[in-house]
């Protein structure tokens, strides 16, 4: 294969066929990936690595894949590592016979516990040599650590971590620490892993050849693996299926099933009704109300159980026992299993009207008891992905919607279908948009109906366009940004932070890029609340994966931990900020002018913040709509 980068760390990492794979093999690969920046080269490295595993000890492919993904279980199972710094520091001090305060000092200087561990190991002399670590041993110990809870769990976790560190050689301690923190930070994303897995699987010779109409088998294999993962994000099923049946049969054996959340389809922004009519010139489309609530994927299993998943595949069932009851009550008896996509919206059943998102967000997040629910919720269903044993995502929306409409009894305030019209008349759509906004919706989502209208899991698709009323009045969509720093307040704001430094996330470079300073849109009480919460996230120095202009000097830096929705007047090329640097100007980034805080987005993780790519797209869209944008102004 051309350009293939060989990965042969043979000196320390060799093993016989069938033998458990040493952990140093994966650690050295992490080192090698960290020193590369091109995605193609990194994919090659990982592909070669996976091929080696498949050829020698295929039983270890699953733990190798999990370690590369820095996961220990599928996201929806809610079993995560993310071990806190305090335990890691203690375990490290014990493993390497150091004082905790010395470890903390080194951490302050180096800013990364992985590097501290690596440096500490070097100075460590051990009497007896412990057995070397294998991939399986590390992975099994991680799973064990993650599953522990209760009174003595901290002690036991620490002992397990210490055990791993004592046995670790070379650069292994560095990656054990980072994996435990769930922060690998080597510039490697799960999408690259999936691509490498697809390519590696395409090389397995014992499996049948690719179908004759496939022109580029490697590309096709990558497409298959990524596609399967978006509907069934479970390595425990995909990896064994790849090994036994090969990549060309993967879609036949791995498909969506109730109980495993599908990555939801997302929409692109548009600014004007006329733009929609132009985009979908010869295609029939439907306009639906865009409800302002919480995305919910509702799964109904054949045994009658129900699960609800959030936009990012978290299990939300405990938050909505009322929705579980409604679904079971209003589904028709012919319906035995399904996956439904919809929005949960706060609802006043007496006045028969939708309530704003802010009311929904007052509901407790976990273990909600039916009798204590104060805010009622109505399910607004808009899609059906699976019904009675049959996946529907390859069907056109028109077909899926018909199946949806046939499956439930409607009961206002409990279960309704998203209000929709099918029209390509500009005036009619404008009226419909006004009606949506009048009934507390944010605007419309416009969807293709019977051409290019399959359900595209995890895609921000051109076939779903969102049109919010206020897009047309100001700058399109809002942004979801991560606070990475703050400035001390003065005057009335003394004692809190007065302004925050926000960043978007660049998926390719895996870094947070500063985009604006934010000091408006908060009440004093909210400011106090945010300040108190974020004070626990202060870090001594900016992370190496923060990118910001030298002129920015926040008083404190934060660990990326939450996402804030922010609205702005417009976007501008910035001499100071670094968002989407290189995308519209080789050396300058983009910044937001006049940003205002809207709300904290609890349903997004920092890495799901607005991406650098989206920021660049919005800048270009703005330029397109306003041929003479204002000169390069700065918000601060
Ligand atoms: P995104 O999900 O696109 O990253 P976001 O979470 O900020 O961004 P919006 O951009 O406001 O959400 O719009 C998409 C969301 O709108 C969907 O994820 C869904 O929760 C919601 N929504 C409300 N009504 C509908 C509808 N009829 N069809 C699809 N989505 C809808």
Image (cartoon, rainbow, N blue to C red):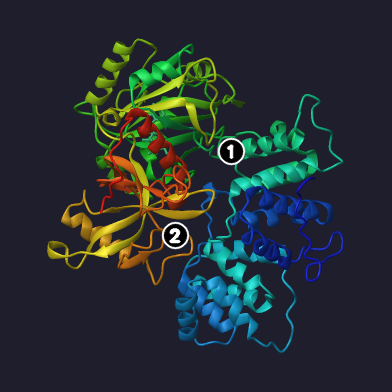
Dot 1 beta carbon under 8 Å from ligand 1: no
Q: Position of residue 428 (x, y in %)?
A: 30, 11
Mark 2 falls on what kind of element?
strand
Determine whether the residue tagged by mark 1 lies in a helix, strand or loop. Answer: helix
Q: Nearer the viewer, residue 536 or 486?
A: 486
Please say whether residue 157 is visible from this viewpoint: no
The CA distance from mark 1 to mark 2 is 29 Å
Q: Quadrant of residue 627?
A: top left
Q: In which quarter of the image is ligand 1?
A: top left
Q: Where is residue 443 in the image (x, y as percent from the top left)?
A: 31, 27
Left or right: where does residue 557 sit relative to residue 494?
A: right
The residue where tag 1 is placed is 230
Instruction: Classify 562 as above or below 150.
Output: above
The residue that disc 2 covers is 546
Query: Which residue is found at the position 59% from the left and 79% from the top?
Result: 119
Q: Which residue is drawn at 16% across and 65% down?
A: 490
Label 1: few (<14), some or many (≥20) within 10 Å?
many
Q: Is residue 410 left or right of residue 174?
A: left
Residue at x 69% of width, y 75% of height? 170
Nearer to the camera, 183 or 635:
635
Q: Which of marks 1 and 2 is nearer the N terminus?
A: 1
Compared to residue 410, the image places residue 587 above or below, namely: below
Q: Where is residue 496 in the image (x, y as percent from the top left)?
A: 22, 64
Q: In this view, does 607 lie above or below 410?
A: below
- Relative horizontal placement of residue 545, taking residue 189 as reference (left or right): left
Q: For ligand 1, tell me if the residue under mark 2 lies within 8 Å.
A: no
> Tag on residue 63?
none
Q: Nearer the viewer, residue 53 or 491?
A: 491
For disc 2, the neighbor class at 10 Å (few under 14, some 14 to 19, many from 20) is some
- On the question of residue 313 being in view, the answer is yes
Reply above or below: 219 against 542: above
């Amino acid at each position: 294969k051309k350009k293939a980068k060989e990965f042969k760390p043979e000196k320390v990492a060799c093993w016989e066929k069938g033998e458990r794979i040493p952990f140093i093999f994966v650690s050295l690969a992490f080192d090698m990936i960290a020193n590369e920046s091109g995605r193609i080269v990194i994919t090659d490295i990982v592909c070669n690595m996976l091929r080696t595993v498949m050829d020698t000890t295929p039983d270890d492919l699953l733990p190798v894949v999990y370690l590369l993904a820095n996961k220990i279980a599928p996201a929806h199972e809610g079993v995560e590592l993310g071990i806190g710094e305090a335990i890691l520091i203690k375990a490290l001090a014990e493993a390497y016979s150091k004082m905790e305060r010395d470890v903390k000092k080194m951490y302050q200087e180096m800013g990364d516990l992985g590097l501290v561990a690596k440096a500490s190991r070097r100075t460590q002399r051990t009497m007896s040599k412990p057995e070397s670590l294998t991939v399986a041993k590390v992975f099994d110990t991680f799973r064990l650590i993650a599953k522990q809870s209760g009174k003595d769990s901290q002690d036991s976790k620490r002992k397990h971590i210490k055990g791993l560190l004592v046995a670790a050689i070379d650069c292994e301690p560095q990656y054990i620490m980072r994996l435990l923190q769930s922060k690998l930070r080597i510039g490697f994303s799960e999408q690259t892993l999936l691509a490498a897995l697809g390519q590696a699987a395409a090389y397995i010779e014992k499996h049948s050849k690719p179908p004759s109409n496939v022109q580029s088998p490697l590309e096709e294999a990558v497409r298959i693996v990524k596609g399967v993962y978006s509907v069934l994000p479970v390595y425990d099923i995909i990896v064994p299926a790849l090994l036994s049946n090969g990549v060309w049969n993967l879609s036949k054996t791995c498909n969506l099933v109730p109980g495993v959340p599908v990555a939801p389809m997302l929409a692109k922004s548009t600014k004007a009704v006329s733009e929609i009519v132009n985009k979908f010139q010869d295609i029939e489309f439907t306009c639906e109300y865009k409800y302002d609530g919480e995305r919910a994927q509702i799964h109904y299993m054949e045994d009658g159980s129900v699960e609800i998943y959030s936009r990012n595949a978290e299990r939300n069932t405990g938050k909505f026992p009322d929705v579980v009851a409604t679904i079971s009550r209003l589904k028709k008896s012919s319906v035995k299993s399904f996956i439904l996509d919809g929005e949960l919206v706060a609802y006043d059943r007496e006045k028969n009207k939708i309530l704003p998102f802010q009311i929904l967000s007052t509901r407790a997040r976990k273990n909600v008891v039916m009798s204590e629910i104060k805010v009622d919720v109505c399910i607004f269903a808009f899609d059906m992905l699976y019904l009675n044993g049959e996946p529907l995502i390859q069907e056109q929306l028109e077909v899926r919607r018909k199946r949806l409409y046939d499956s439930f009894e409607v009961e206002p305030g409990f279960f309704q279908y998203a209000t929709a019209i099918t029209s390509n008349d500009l005036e009619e759509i404008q009226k419909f948009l006004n009606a949506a906004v009048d009934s507390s919706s944010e605007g419309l989502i416009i969807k293709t109906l019977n051409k290019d209208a399959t359900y595209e899991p995890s895609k921000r698709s051109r076939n779903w366009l969102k049109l919010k009323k206020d897009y047309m009045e100001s700058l399109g969509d809002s942004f979801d940004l991560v606070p990475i720093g703050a400035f001390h307040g003065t005057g009335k704001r003394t004692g809190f932070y007065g302004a925050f430094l926000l960043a978007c996330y660049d998926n390719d470079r895996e870094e947070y890029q500063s985009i604006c300073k934010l000091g408006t849109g908060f009440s004093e009480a909210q400011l106090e609340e945010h300040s108190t919460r974020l004070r626990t996230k202060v870090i001594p120095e900016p992370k190496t994966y923060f990118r910001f202009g030298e002129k920015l000097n926040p008083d404190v830096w934060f660990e990326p931990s939450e996402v804030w929705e922010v609205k702005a007047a417009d976007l501008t090329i910035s001499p100071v900020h670094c968002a989407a640097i290189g995308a519209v100007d080789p050396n300058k980034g983009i910044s937001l002018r006049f940003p205002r805080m809207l709300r904290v987005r609890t349903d997004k993780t920092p890495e799901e913040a607005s991406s650098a790519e989206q920021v660049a797209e919005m800048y270009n869209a703005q330029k397109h709509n306003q041929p003479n944008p204002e000169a390069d102004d700065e918000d601060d």
